[in-house]
Image (tube, rainbow, N blue to C red):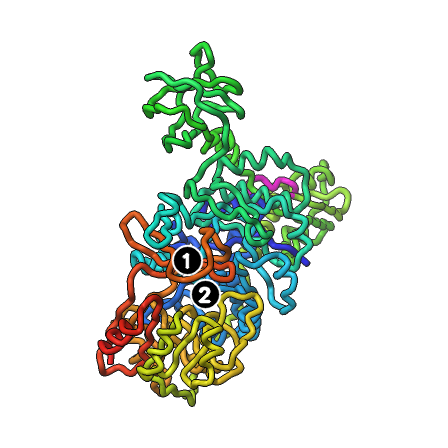
Amino acid sequence: MVKELLSPVGNMECLYQAIHNGADAVYLGMKSFGARHFATNFTEEEIKEAVSLCHLYQVRIYVTMNTLIKNKEVDAFLEQVSFLYKIGVDALIMQDIGMIHLVRKKYPNLEIHASTQANNSSIETIKMFYKLGVKRVVLSREISLEEIKKIDIPIELEVFIHGALCISYSGCCLMSAMMGERSGNRGECTGSCRLLYDLYEKEKKIVSSKYLLSTRELNTTSHIKELLNSNINSFKIEGRMKSKEYVGFVTRLYRMLLDQKRIDYDKKQEELKTLYHRKFTDGHLFHSTNIMNIDTPNHIGLKIGKVVEITKNKIKIKLEKPLNQEDGIRFFESGKGCIVNYLYDNHLKLVNSSKDIAIIDNKINLRTLDTVYKTQDKKLMDDLGKLEWKKIGIDISFKAKIGKPMVLKVSSNDKEIIEYGEVVEKARNAPLSKEQVIKQLEKLGNTCFQKSTIQIDMDQDIFIPVRYLNEIRRKALEKLEKSFKQKEVEVTENVLSYQKLEVSDKARMTCTCYQEEQIKTCLTLGFDRIYVVEEEYYQKYKNHPAIYYVERRNLFHSNLEFEKSLIHEYQEVKSSKIIGNYTLNVTNIYSLYYLLENGFANVCLSLELKERELEEFLEEFEKKFGFSFSPEILVYGTCCNMMIKGNILNIEEGYFRYQLKDKKGRLFPVYQKENHTYILNYQKIVKNLRNKFSYVKRFEFYDESGEEIKRIVKKFI
């Protein structure tokens, strides 16, 4: 199986670094619809140039359109899809299920990859994407290599092997949207997982001011053999917000490792740490127990020594690793840092580098004997700035027969150009030698080509002016370069039509309950569906028609256990009583239509839609599809902001005991169940749509008592 190295590209300079350091493919985004909204990203003209450059070097180019799409954005989204399709991008990476279905119907020949934001954490989800015609799934970072090897679906598998980790299952994080109305699912994540939190058990603070949700950086360089022996098709590096030097170095490192070339492994790890390092982890891919770095969310660097003496003007450092002038350093305990503009030896003489004792100016007013880390290596950055451009090997064949036009054939991979020149004449005195012909044809200069082989078939005693040889070579190479850059795109576009679905849901009020008291109360209040979190209570009350079970989330094998269920992931349903939760991220009418068409009885719309957008959604659905439907809309409750693999806070199982507190004093309920950590929102969601709209009112009860539930429901009836 061919293994692809896939590199991140945030701008044109990063693109050059990725291509010329050995990437087989790159992924990048435009100004809209990509999950890295704050990266530089690409304009239309830049992305045309990027497509040409990638195809010239036989590098595949994938464009991220992996955000949730709202109804008013659909037309602009499809315009961008059409533009990218026609200029020859190799695939689009998408999250939104409605848009994936829409694009697959409209452009059946356009390759689609399901983003990790689509939460590809279960076999059932992967099966559904395969049946939808998706070519590749980007697997959730929480899946282990052993689980990946069990995926026997004929679909390409892409896996992150290096870079930043999301603490939450991707596509399952509402933290940023709920805290600051900037949606991680729409490319605007505020990095709330990189903030300071306190942990409370009841009223008692048990952890103070730590980065309790901050992860380490993924680094799988020590597991290359296992990766190469796996069924993974594409190895993905994270980093569209990283520097061009980072992209170049990490791409080159993994290129050498995947090609099984010899490297100084320890040295490369040290260099890697100076580029970006939040401590490293093997990740869930290799069952690492060291996922978190609660001490700092930032780049640490490489530990190089210890401060042993401080004066008002100077800092003396005992070194473990070399320090050079113009390196960047950080003093860990104080958090201060600086660039080493002047470096002195033990006798206060200026030096360019030091390996033992280093003295620097105390321009940051350091007062503590800190540990010293190198956060930027000047020599390494200079080396990475000297980018050696790749050359494309070509085969050259030249034929020159007296009385006939000379013929030059240049070829590479499956591309071949034949160029005809002037008629070859018989030499009158000084014939052209074969060596002279070779010399001229091998002059590839500043082109992107280099000679692989050259064959000459020529008569003796011929005469060809040198300028003719130069001209035929130039024309042939220009045409060959153009043939690489211009990918022939056969655009197939279908006219879309939608049938009226025979679906209806007579429910008007549903809720989720964690406690038995809540279940008993809701049964008396006439709820049409009561979603029960605890299986014990479900088994006790399941004979009541209103009782549904809340299926477990993000299980690798997520076969539906119960006929009446609330589910969280995309999958085929085999019962007429399956409800999709708000975790399906339905933000447009096409997503709802697709899920109803595929057997869902109802779906709770995304919590990221504002009241006005929800009203517009209901109007637009009927207008587009010719029938009305009443989806579930959360009108009250405590939503789940994050679901995290592992007991990352080291808390006991059970609800209602623990809370995280941020620096603004907001309290987030936290619980751990079956080795997963759940973080709920700090405040109740309350929404009131105008009475003219028909929808199912959904309540999400967590810690409310029976009496509180009665008062709450009364306000909405």
Quarter of the image for the C terminus: give it.
bottom left
- Which amino acid type corresponds to the residue marked 2 in the rendered image? Gln
Q: What residue appears at the point 38 percent right and 72 percent down from the top-left corner?
A: 513
Residue 538 appears at what percent x and percent y? 46, 77
Kindly report the distance in space between the C-alpha atoms of the residues bearing marks 1 and 2: 9 Å
Whether the magenta-drawn stretch holds residue 444 is answered as: yes
Q: Is residue 233 above or below residue 511?
A: above
> Image check: 363 left or right of 112?
left
Q: Amino acid at mark 1?
A: Ala
- Part of the protein shown in magenta: 442-450
Q: Quadrant of the N terminus?
A: bottom right
Does any portion of residue 481 appear in the rendered image?
Answer: no
Residue 620: quarter of image: bottom left
Residue 488's disc number: none
Q: Which residue is mark 2?
A: 95
Which residue, as the protein is rendered here, is positioned at the far top?
A: 347
Magenta stretch encompasses residue 89: no
Q: Of the two numbered discs 1 and 2 on the same chain, state the one appearing first in sequence.
A: 1
Depicted 116 relative to depicted 594: above or below: above
Mark 1, secondary structure of its residue: loop
Query: What residue is shown with label 1?
Result: 35
> Circles 1 and 2: CB distance less than 8 Å?
yes
